[in-house]
């Protein structure tokens, strides 16, 4: 491990700072995150951290000192306060920021339990919604989340912030489209003959409160604006809806998905 001090915006810092906004660079170099819960979960779940960032101009807590002392990262960057603020995505920067590798995507990352529950989110367009669904899936015992299609970046700072650390504990897989998912679903149906692929839509045939979710389930959530694609609707065995009242015509996709997953948990006890 080496310590690199940076006091001004040199070329090295500009490369690091570009990771906040440049998705292509993140895919090659990794993503930056911050905060106690994110850092703790990244370490707990054995993510490969390449670098830590801090400023020796301000005193570090015992928590931060201990992490740096036991760090296996290649590099520690000691930045000026102003540069740490610029690298941070918060008004008041965290005392520790980290740079991690982006893990390879593969459906084998999802470890299936006795009664599988997997959520598929197709073409999410909002970092906040994606992050909230990650958080809900983690909190409500989902085996894994699959993101398909042209989607907002899972490793965008705004998305990471919305996950409140669940990014690092929930198995998440990104796939180019539905086509890459279909062979896996066929295998899952052979392995679990009772498995149901269930789509969510405001015009679904069944209320979630009358549908039987006790069998293995792959739950489909669609794009915020357009909902589920025709391909996913054809793939679904059944379509369900959340009964709503008042003048609202539909629910936010993150809220709706959380409600459905909560109902699945309730039914399964």
Image (spheres, rainbow, N blue to C red):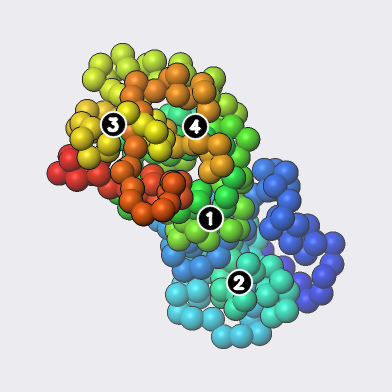
Say which residue label 2 marks.
Answer: 90
The secondary element bearing badge 1 is classed as helix
Q: CA distance from mark 2 to mark 1?
A: 15 Å
Q: Earlier in the sequence, mark 1 or mark 4?
A: 1
Marks 2, 3: nearer the viewer: 3
Q: Earlier in the sequence, mark 2 or mark 4?
A: 2
Mark 2 or mark 1, which is nearer to you? 1
Q: Earlier in the sequence, mark 4 or mark 3?
A: 3
> Marks 4 and 3: which is nearer the front?
3
Q: Nearer the viewer, mark 1 or mark 3?
A: 3
Residue 228 marker: 4
Quadrant holding the N terminus: bottom right
Mark nearer the viewer, 1 or 4:
4
Left or right, 252 with reference to 240: right
Q: Are marks 1 and 4 in contact (CB under 8 Å)?
A: no
Spot occupied by residue 27 in the image (x, y as percentages of width and height): 67, 43
Residue 50 seen by the camera: no
On screen, residue 200 above or below 141: above
- The numbered disc on residue 206 is 3
């Amino acid at each position: 491990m080496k310590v690199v001090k940076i006091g001004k915006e040199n070329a090295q810092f500009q490369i690091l700072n570009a990771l906040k906004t440049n998705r292509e660079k993140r895919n090659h170099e990794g993503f930056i995150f911050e905060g106690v819960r994110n850092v703790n979960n990244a370490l707990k779940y054995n993510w490969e951290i390449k670098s830590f960032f801090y400023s020796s101009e301000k005193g570090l807590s015992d928590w931060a000192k201990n992490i740096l002392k036991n760090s296996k990262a290649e590099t520690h960057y000691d930045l000026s306060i102003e540069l740490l603020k610029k690298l941070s995505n918060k008004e008041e920067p965290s005392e520790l920021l980290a740079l991690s590798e982006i893990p390879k995507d593969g459906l084998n990352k999802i470890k299936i339990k006795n009664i599988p529950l997997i959520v598929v989110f197709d073409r999410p367009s909002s970092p906040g919604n994606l992050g909230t669904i990650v958080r809900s899936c983690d909190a409500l015992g989902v085996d894994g989340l699959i993101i398909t299609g042209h989607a907002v970046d899972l490793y965008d700072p705004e998305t990471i912030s919305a996950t409140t650390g669940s990014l690092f504990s929930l198995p998440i897989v990104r796939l180019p489209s539905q086509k890459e998912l279909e062979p896996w679903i066929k295998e899952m149906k052979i392995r679990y003959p009772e498995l149901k692929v269930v789509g969510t839509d405001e015009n679904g045939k069944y209320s979630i409160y009358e549908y039987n979710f006790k069998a293995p389930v792959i739950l489909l959530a669609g794009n915020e604006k357009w909902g589920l694609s025709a391909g996913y609707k054809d793939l679904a065995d059944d379509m369900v809806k959340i009964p709503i009242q008042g003048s609202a015509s539909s629910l936010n996709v993150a809220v709706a998905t959380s409600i459905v997953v909560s109902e699945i948990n309730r039914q399964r006890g």
